[in-house]
């Protein structure tokens, strides 16, 4: 994949101009914070890549404004400007000191690429080289910045490609940081909601891990699967309402509540992906979601908790049963899995993991799986640095595997949702032709 001619052609469009580093605007001193049980499993994932692109001009002035705002926001979010480290017992932590490099900022140009090309891109080909750290493991945060931002001048706008070290923060913290940075750039003097940095308040078990980097950690592309392809499906408000209405058309037979938008859409994607894969009736299929646990833990943590506070939640059934049963069957499996993951279940999962730590690979989500990350609740289109809302928000190629799904709020707002899906090429082709899935209302 990394060596094909299309990739070379795209690479020639993006030219790196300079690389610099940005540190907090004031002295912070030495800070150390132990990584906790919720963070550690992600050390063998890849950096989490996000791309935002904006219609605007005056590139140089925009870059300086971004750097100025970054200096201010890092005074609160200083952990992002640090590095991974280990204490004397081999326990991983995030470390910050004033003499560290800080956040990496790369400036680039791609004058052949326009906003329209990025906005209509269904896969990730057009923007692979607009986001740094493709194929870079989070464990490399021991000697790399924990955030790298590439700001690229386009034909008619600016692309911001961000690579966040997933071992130190999840999606909720990522978008808290991005919205805070945007607020500062838009004229605020300070961050409106400070990050809650005391991650050991949620769990303080010290887990020693003996981890080292593989011999050749940068493989050029994180998704070296069998002909993996990505596609963005845009579901309008009308389509989302139709999906939810269909799943809720028959009351569940047991004590289930009405199915939420997420549960309805989760079933819709799971059902149609299973159909497209042409699985045997007896084949198992797993549905996985990465659930925010801030309000599930006891005591609950604030929304501003900075770190990973997510758990992978699984449910499984036979493909034939999922496809032959009414929608309420699959939706209720998802609903029950979510509702069962309470404080007691979280505590049991953590104790089990701490007794026998298992470092996930990014593709360990289950057999014939559909795995949902990100959330349409994240206000990604409100990330306005002072030159308007983004024209598009997408995920990069890292951490994609057969069945990985990212959900974003739709650009048109309201209840619309964008669904990014990575699938084996043949299955994706069938999914695209499935009119009952696409629902062009």
Image (cartoon, grey):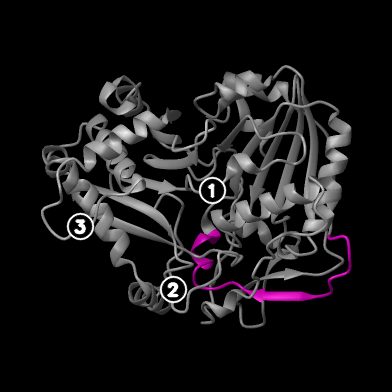
Measure how far apart labels 2 and 1 are at the Cα level. Answer: 20 Å
Q: Is residue 233 visible?
A: yes
* Element on which disc 3 rests: loop
Badge 3: residue crowd in 10 Å (few <14, some 14–19, many ≥20): some
Residue drawn 54% across the image and 72% down it: 210
The residues tagged by marks 2 and 3 sit, at their Cα atoms, a distance apart of 23 Å
Mark seen at residue 192:
none
Please report the residue visible at 83 percent of the width from the left and 63 percent of the height from the top: 100
| Most foreground residue, 62 or 166 | 62
Q: Main secondary structure of the magenta part?
A: loop
- Residue 106 position in % (x across, y down): 79, 40
Residue at 45 percent across and 41 percent down: it is 407
Task: State the separation of the CA atoms marked 3 and 1.
Answer: 26 Å
Is residue 28 shown in magenta? Answer: yes
Report the front residue among 91 and 2: 91
Which segment did they paint magenta?
A: 24-43
Q: Which residue is mark 1?
A: 378
The residue that disc 2 covers is 297
- State the SS at label 2: loop
Looking at the picture, does residue 97 appear above or below residue 201?
Answer: above
- Judge from the rendering whether residue 402 lies leftward or rightward of residue 127; answer left or right: left
Tags 2 and 1 touching, CB below 8 Å: no
Q: Which residue is mark 3?
A: 256
Q: Earlier in the sequence, mark 2 or mark 3?
A: 3
């Amino acid at each position: 994949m990394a060596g094909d001619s299309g990739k070379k052609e795209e690479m020639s469009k993006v030219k790196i101009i300079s690389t610099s580093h940005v540190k907090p605007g004031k002295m912070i001193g030495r800070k150390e914070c132990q990584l906790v049980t919720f963070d550690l499993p992600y050390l063998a994932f890849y950096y989490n890549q996000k791309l935002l692109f904006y219609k605007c001009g005056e590139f140089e002035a925009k870059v300086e404004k971004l750097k100025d705002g970054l200096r201010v926001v890092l005074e609160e979010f200083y952990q992002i400007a640090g590095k991974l480290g280990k204490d004397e017992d081999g326990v991983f932590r995030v470390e910050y000191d004033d003499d560290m490099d800080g956040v990496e900022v790369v400036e680039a140009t791609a004058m052949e690429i326009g906003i329209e090309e990025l906005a209509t891109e269904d896969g990730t080909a057009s923007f692979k080289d607009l986001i740094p750290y493709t194929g870079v493991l989070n464990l490399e945060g021991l000697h790399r910045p924990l955030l790298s931002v590439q700001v690229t001048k386009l034909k008619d706008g600016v692309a911001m490609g961000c690579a966040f070290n997933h071992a130190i923060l999840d999606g909720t913290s990522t978008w808290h940081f991005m919205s805070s940075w945007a607020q500062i750039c838009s004229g605020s003097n300070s961050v409106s909601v400070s990050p809650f940095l005391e991650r050991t308040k949620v769990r303080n078990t010290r887990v020693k891990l003996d981890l080292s980097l593989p011999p050749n950690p940068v493989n050029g592309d994180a998704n070296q699967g069998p002909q993996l392809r990505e596609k963005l499906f845009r579901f309008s408000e009308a389509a989302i309402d139709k999906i939810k209405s269909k799943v809720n058309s028959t009351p569940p037979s047991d004590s289930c509540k009405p199915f939420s938008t997420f549960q309805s859409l989760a079933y819709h994607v799971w059902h149609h992906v299973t159909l497209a894969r042409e699985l045997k009736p007896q084949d198992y299929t797993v549905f996985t979601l990465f659930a925010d646990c801030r309000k599930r833990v006891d005591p609950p943590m604030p929304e501003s908790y900075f770190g990973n506070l997510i758990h992978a939640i699984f449910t499984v059934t036979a493909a034939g049963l999922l496809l032959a049963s009414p929608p309420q069957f699959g939706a209720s499996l998802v609903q029950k899995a979510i509702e069962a993951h309470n404080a007691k279940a979280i505590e049991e999962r953590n104790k089990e993991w701490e007794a026998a730590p298992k470092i996930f690979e990014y593709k360990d989500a289950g057999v014939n799986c559909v795995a949902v990350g990100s959330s349409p609740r994240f206000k990604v289109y409100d990330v306005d640095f002072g030159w308007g809302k983004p024209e598009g928000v997408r995920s990069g190629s890292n951490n994609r595997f057969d069945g990985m799904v990212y959900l974003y709020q739709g650009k048109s707002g309201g209840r619309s949702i964008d669904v990014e899906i990575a699938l084996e090429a043949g299955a994706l082709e069938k999914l695209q032709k499935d009119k009952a899935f696409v629902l062009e209302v």
